[in-house]
Image (cartoon, rainbow, N blue to C red):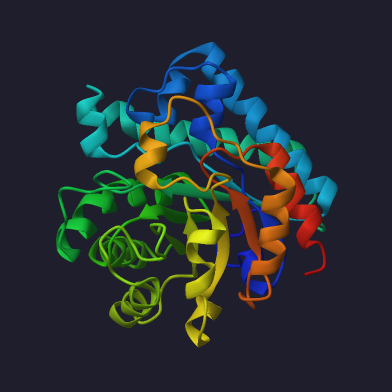
């Protein structure tokens, strides 16, 4: 079933996402992901099998928990700047987007239970520069032009929605939203924050969400927070604006972004503790319907989050 015009998470259906795809593939599966680009795993049979098994595990968690599943494409780094650094052509990159949407469509056909566990195909977009410390800051117009290519492919190949993950500053988020609006495809904007609760740019989370809404007539379907530990942002979640946050994909680790970048081993935290923290955050976020993980998390964390937030 396709959900582009009626995303189930917008009508209160509890949904999960996956966890930290890249960290799972690198640290648990032993795969090499140059530039942290998960889509490069599709170049080998072993990589394709690992991603398929990874997504199936989360699909099974969703069905067992009677929650929907926001199925992410492995395309966080599959945009022009990163493809050029990986010596990948635009033609090949376009084919990657077609393949990933097709693969998730097959998974949906095989495992979805629409009445209790709707599966949404979500095209993932990452930042044009580093997801922690960008050195090149795009204008809104530049961001719209840059990301419109990837959004166009997701629209063409039938994704239900797109999500911009690990956004570090306001202008890029506005540009992405404008590009999605031009294609009339739903978009979720996920900001990351530092240990002080502010974006890496120094902009406040509240200001970022309000600015994107104001600049785009409230076009984002919803906002998310990702790639930060709950301790880093719980203290800023006050005010009516938090009603626009419908998704959380937190890190298991309390390490800063700088420390995570330098880490040579995986800090996977405590799944049960992370679940309890999500349960606490659900009282601060009245419209929270989409939960999952980010760096260092895997199926254990997402299962624990489901158990802890059941009925919240």
| Above or below 240: residue 224 | above
Side of 296 where 106 appears, left or right: right
Query: What residue is shown at x 34% (from left), y 34% (from top)?
Result: 94
- Quarter of the view holding residue 141: bottom left
Query: What residue is shown at x 67% (from left), y 60% (from top)?
Result: 277
Q: Which x, y percent locates residue 23?
A: 51, 31
Q: Which x, y percent locates residue 125?
A: 38, 48
Closest to the observer: 180 or 213?
213
Q: Which x, y percent locates residue 201?
A: 25, 61
Look at the image and tell me whether residue 117 can be seen: no
Give the total number of marks visible in the rendering: 0
Quadrant where the image shows the C terminus:
bottom right
Q: Which x, y percent locates residue 223?
A: 48, 67
Query: What residue is shown at x 60% (from left), y 36% (from top)?
Result: 268
- Quarter of the view holding residue 116: bottom right
Side of 61 where 50 appears, left or right: left
| Above or below 236: residue 78 | above
Look at the image and tell me whether residue 162 can be seen: yes
Q: Residue furthest top?
A: 45
Q: Residue furthest bottom?
A: 240
């Amino acid at each position: 079933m396709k959900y582009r015009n009626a995303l189930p998470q917008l009508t209160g259906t509890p949904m999960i996402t996956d966890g930290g795809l890249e960290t799972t593939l690198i640290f648990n599966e032993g795969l090499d992901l140059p530039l942290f680009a998960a889509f490069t795993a599709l170049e080998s049979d072993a990589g394709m099998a690992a991603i398929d098994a990874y997504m199936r595990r989360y699909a099974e968690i969703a069905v067992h928990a009677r929650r929907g599943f926001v199925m992410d494409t492995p395309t966080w780094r599959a945009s022009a700047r990163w493809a050029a650094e990986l010596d990948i052509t635009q033609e090949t990159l376009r084919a990657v987007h077609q393949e990933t949407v097709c693969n998730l469509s097959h998974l949906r056909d095989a495992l979805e239970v629409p009445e209790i566990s709707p599966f949404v195909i979500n095209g993932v977009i990452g930042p044009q520069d580093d997801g922690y410390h960008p050195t090149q800051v795009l204008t809104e117009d530049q961001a719209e032009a840059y990301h419109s290519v990837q959004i166009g492919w997701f629209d063409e190949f039938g994704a239900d929605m797109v999500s911009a993950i690990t956004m570090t500053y306001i202008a890029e988020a506005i540009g992405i939203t404008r590009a999605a609006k031009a294609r009339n495809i739903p978009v979720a904007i996920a900001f990351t924050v530092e240990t002080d609760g502010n974006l890496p740019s120094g902009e406040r989370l509240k200001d970022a969400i309000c600015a994107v809404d104001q600049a785009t007539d409230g076009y984002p379907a919803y906002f998310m927070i990702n790639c930060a530990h709950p301790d880093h942002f719980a203290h800023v979640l006050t005010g009516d604006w938090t009603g626009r946050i419908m998704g959380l994909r937190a890190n298991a680790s309390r390490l800063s972004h700088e420390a995570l970048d330098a880490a040579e081993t995986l800090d996977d935290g405590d799944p049960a503790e992370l679940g309890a923290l999500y349960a606490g955050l659900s009282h601060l976020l009245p419209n929270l319907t989409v939960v999952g993980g980010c760096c260092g998390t895997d199926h254990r964390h997402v299962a624990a989050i489901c158990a802890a937030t059941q009925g919240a």
